[in-house]
Amino acid sequence: MEDILKYLNYGLLIFSLAAVTAEILHWSPLVVFFAAALGVVPLAGFLGKATEELALYTGPKLGGLLNATLGNAAELIITIVAIWTGATNPELREGLLELVKASITGSILGNLLLILGASILLGGLKFTRQRFNRNQAGVNATMLILAVIALAIPSLFSHSIETVNRAGVEYLSIGVAVVMIVVYVLSIIFSFQTEDTPADTTPDDTRHQPQWSKRTAIIVLIAATAGIAWLSEALVGAVEPVVEALGISEFFLGIILIPLVGNVAEHVVAVQMALKNKMELSLAISLGSSLQIALFVAPLLVFISLLMNNPLTLTFNIFELVALFAATLIATFIALDGESNWLEGAQLLGVYVIIGIAFFFLPA
């Protein structure tokens, strides 16, 4: 399985080259967009692999921090490029800011419903029932609820604040972003203090040795980051023509496609862990990635957007908020009892499909 995925990863690199060729020769924006989207997938995989290899050299605590910081680097790069493009092209600014906020929502939904659902479904079909540490799952579930509340407050208060003080919404977003990052840092500190060996760890985990040298890992990390940045620019630049050609909105692209492209490598690992009966690690990946997006990436983008003179506020529409609350609620109920079965995975996937269909028909 891992060998197949490795060769598939190398095979997808051809789309990176195709995107470069399509951009240079000014081919159809549709070709550029989809080639760039598929080209990001293997580069995101190499970025994740380089991060994991460096983490083995730095030790468990610094390694955990490195993974926590760079876990969603691919999607962070894509959204930064979108903000930058909006800053340099005022005509596209509003649509691209909506794309960024939709990708934040889509990443959380994808991790909580699609990836967690696929992991629980496939793991449950193989092992019937799988167990995990309910205490850690409870901590992550509580953090998720806090994250959704933090994203909802500016959204719900913004309409009333904006009528009196237009700049107040921006200041509110900055204040909330500061609190979210502080809570995220505290959660990392707490995890270091309470770090135990997972119940499903096997002796193979403890003997895992680096496969790359430190120099190789750093070179791959830099090269993958540069490649993702370039492909992201091509991807974002083709959004407007693709939206017009396919008759869909930037909003739907942000909810469904961009999160899948940016996080696919991490998603595959979560499913692999479930198939090895390591549900604790699988949950740590899916729930941890959701927390990182909500409590670190989203507030970080607020500050980055200020530096680019294209302010991003943490104001989401009511449809996004309903979807986030629904996903968090069902994921929390499933995580709290300390065990999972294939039916629960099917339920999560069912909710994701329903939400995806609804967002597809939602007008721009």
Image: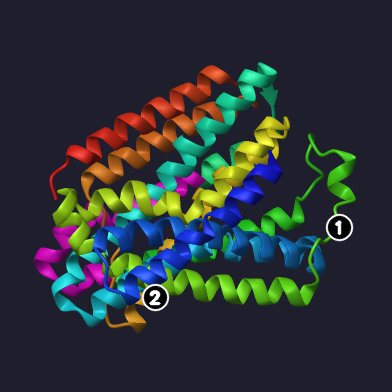
Q: Secondary structure at mark 2?
A: helix
Residue drawn at x 54%, y 40% as measured from the top left? 141
Circles 2 and 1: CB atoms closer than 8 Å: no
For the N terminus, the quadrant is top right
Quadrant in which residue 276 is drawn:
top right
Residue 303 has which mark?
2
Instruction: Identify the residue shown where x is 79% and y is 60%.
Output: 60
Percent position of residue 350, x then y: 39, 25
Instruction: State the image coordinates of residue 223 (x, y, percent, origin top left).
Output: 58, 75
Per the rendered image, the range of residues in magenta is 144-170
Q: At label 2, which amino acid type do we have?
A: Phe
Does 297 lie within the magenta span? Answer: no
Q: Earlier in the sequence, mark 2 or mark 1?
A: 1
Observer able to see residue 179: no
The way the protein has been coloured in the rendering is: rainbow
Is 229 or 285 nearer to us in this picture?
A: 229
Q: Is residue 341 left or right of residue 306?
A: right
Determine which quarter of the picture holds residue 50. bottom right
In three-dimensional space, the C-alpha distance between marks 2 and 1, rounded to whole angstroms, equals 37 Å
- Tell me where residue 204 appears, x and y as whole percent: 87, 43
The amino acid on which the numbered mark 1 sits, given as a three-letter code, is Gln
| 10 Å crowding of disc 1: few (<14), some (14-19), many (20+) | few
For label 1, the residue is 209
> Overall secondary structure of the magenta stretch?
helix
Q: Position of residue 89 (x, y in %)?
A: 20, 79
